[in-house]
Amino acid sequence: MFVCPGEGVRVAIDSMPGVCNLSVDLLVEECREAAALGVPGVILFGIPPHKDPTGSGGYDEQGIVQAAIRALKRELPQLMVIADTCLCEYTDHGHCGLVEDGDVHNDKSLALLSRAAVSQAQAGADIVAPSDMMDGRVGAIRAALDQAGLERVPILSYAAKYSSAFYGPFRDAAQSAPQFGDRKTYQMDPANHREAMREIRADIDEGADMIMVKPALPYLDVLWNAKQEFGLPTAAYQVSGEYAMLQAATANGWLDAERAVLESLTCIKRAGADFILTYYALQAARLLG
Ligand code: PBG
C-alpha cells in the first residue's frame, strides 16, 4: 500500500487500476477492511512531501511511513505491518542509495538504510524489508536494529530482486523512476539464476530471517529453487507490472478475472511461496472467503 501526505487523500494510479495513494486516515480504513477479510499483513511504501538527494524522508522519525505505521499499530494492533526499507521513494534522483560522482555509492548507502530501518521499527513496524539491493545491507541493518534494542524485529530480505521492466507501474505510483541510468548495477540480471542463489545465501549469512523472490510469476524457477535450497520462510512478490497486465486483460474481458487472479496466486504458492505480496490481497481474500 502506498501512503501519501494529507487527509482524505485518495489518488488513483493510472497504470495500476484499483490501487491508490492513500493518506494515513484512508489507509487505516482500507487496512481495517483488509484485516476484516483475513489479510494477515500489509507492506507500506511512502510518498513523502519532499524528495532530496539523501532521501531523508525515509529515515525521518516524523516521516510519512513512520506516521502510517504508528497509526496502524494504534488502530489495528493485530494487523502485521511490514515496512519496505529503501531510499528510492525519497530521493530526488530516484535511486535506491546515495549517489556520488554520478553513481550509486553502495557502502555509504548502508548507514542511511540502517537509519530508515531503525526509524520504521521504532515506529512499530513488525518486520523491516530492505528492497534496495545494496550489498551488505542486511548485516548493517541487523547490527543497527540490535544496537537500538530492536533485536526482536525480523528482516524480510528482498534477496533475489531482479532488474525488471515489471516495476514500471510502481515507479509511477511512487514517482521513483531513476532520473538517470538504471538499477542494473544493484538489481539482478533476469537471465541469471545462480546469482540469485548467491545473493540469497549472502543475505541469510548476514541475518535475514525471511527471503523474497521478486517478481513472482516470471521467476517461479528461482522461487522453487530458493525454497528447496534454503528452506527459510520464503515470500514471492507479485509486482505492479504483473498486476497491471492482469488488470488490463481482465478489464478488456480477455481473461476471466476471478480465475486468472486465483490461478496466478495458486501457482506462485505451488512454486514454494510461504506468503505472497500482492496488490490483489483484498480481492483474493474476498474470492477465497
Ligand atoms: C523499492 C521498491 C520497488 C518495488 C518494491 N520496492 C521499485 C523498484 O525497485 O524500482 C517494486 C514493486 C512493484 O513493482 O510492485 N526499491
Image (tube, helix red, strand yellow):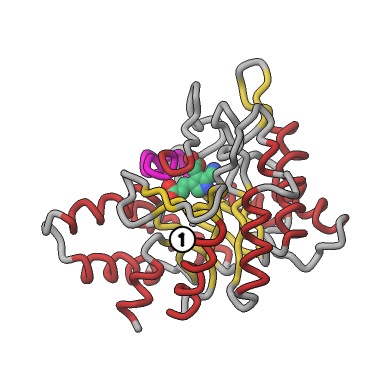
Q: Position of residue 46 (x, y in %)?
A: 57, 48
Dominant SS of magenta comes to helix
Q: Is residue 27 magenta?
A: no
| Along the viewing direction, whichever of 97 and 121 lies nearer the viewer | 121
> Quarter of the image holding residue 81?
bottom right
Q: Which amino acid lies under the numbered mark 1 shown in the image of this protein? A: Ala
| Along the viewing direction, whichever of 158 and 251 lies nearer the viewer | 251
Is residue 191 something that shows in the picture? no
Task: Please give left or right for residue 118 compared with residue 174 in the image.
Answer: right
Q: Name above or below for residue 152 compared with residue 238.
A: below
> Quarter of the image holding residue 237?
bottom left
Q: Quadrant of the C terminus?
A: bottom left
Identify residue for label 1: 236
Q: Position of residue 187 (x, y in %)?
A: 52, 38
Is residue 255 something that shows in the picture? yes
Task: Please give left or right for residue 35 compared with residue 75 in the image.
Answer: left
Report the residue that reaches farthest toward the top: 101
Report the residue that reaches farthest toward the left: 253
Task: Please give left or right for residue 243 compared with residue 63 in the image.
Answer: left
| Along the viewing direction, whichever of 7 and 195 lies nearer the viewer | 7
Q: Name above or below for residue 101 compared with residue 130.
A: above
Q: Position of residue 28 (x, y in %)?
A: 54, 66
Q: Is residue 170 magenta?
A: yes
What residue appears at the point 63 percent right and 49 percent down from the top-left corner? Answer: 64
Q: Position of residue 61 (x, y in %)?
A: 75, 49
What residue appears at the point 45 percent right and 38 percent down from the top-left corner? Answer: 163
What residue appears at the point 52 percent right and 75 percent down from the top-left corner? Answer: 40
What residue appears at the point 58 percent right and 64 percent down from the top-left corner? Answer: 230
Element under label 1?
strand
Count of labels shown? 1
| Numbered range of the magenta stretch | 162-171
